[in-house]
Amino acid sequence: MKKIIVGVMGPGANATDLDVENAYQLGKLIAQAGWVLLTGGRNEGVMDAASKGAKSANGLTVGILPSSDTTTASDAVDIAIVTDLGNARNNINVLSSDIIIACGMGTGTAAEIALALKVNKKVILLNNNQPSKAFFHSLAKQQILIAENPIAAIELANQLLANLN
């Protein structure tokens, strides 16, 4: 049986405290649902927090690294995929995820959202950045779902999964 892969995309060094807190909770909830967590794999910000949250609930974590080695990988990543692709690895993140949750906002996160919209994937936005919510909603109203907290994001993910089957 295929495992559900949930991609949590979000900023690294520029993640806010709320982004990190939300990412940790998302990771934990994803693992509790029995899903696999996919992140950008690095040891900072949303990527690290989501991976740590998933590991706290004995989840499986995958990190798609931009570099040519694992030196920047989060200690909470079980499977580190080394790409040496830099930001181009964002496309791998998006295409490999069954569900995409954007936690926080940064340029890399915005790029991942845009890539998801280009391939007609729905994206769950979890952030308190009203301009980014409005911008992405204006681009693809039917593809953008807004969550106010991690529990709501998981509820939306469950709804999306029900519609995929």
Image (cartoon, rainbow, N blue to C red):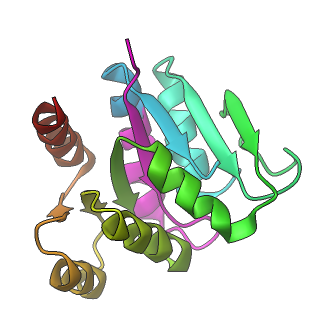
Find the magenta span and give its range. Answer: 1-27
Pick whichever, 109 or 27, lies toward us. 109
Residue 25 part of the magenta-drawn span: yes
Residue 137 place in picture, x, y as percent: 18, 78
Lateral position of residue 100 relative to residue 66, left or right: left
Residue 70 place in picture, x, y as percent: 84, 44
Residue 136 place in picture, x, y as percent: 26, 79
Lateral position of residue 15 relative to residue 164, left or right: right
Q: Residue at x 43, y 37 (%)?
A: 27
Q: Quadrant of the N terminus?
A: top left
Relative to 80, is 128 above or below?
below
Q: Residue at x 18, y 36 (%)?
A: 164
For this orientation, the residue located farthest to the top is: 1
Pick whichever, 116 or 154, lies toward us. 116
Residue 63 seen in the figure: yes
For this orientation, the residue located farthest to the front is: 119
Residue 128 place in picture, x, y as percent: 28, 73
Q: Residue at x 61, y 64 (%)?
A: 12
Pick whichever, 38 or 14, lies toward us. 38
Q: How many marks?
A: 0
Image quarter for residue 90? bottom right
Image quarter for residue 33? top left
Residue 75 seen in the figure: no
Lateral position of residue 95 relative to residue 143, left or right: right
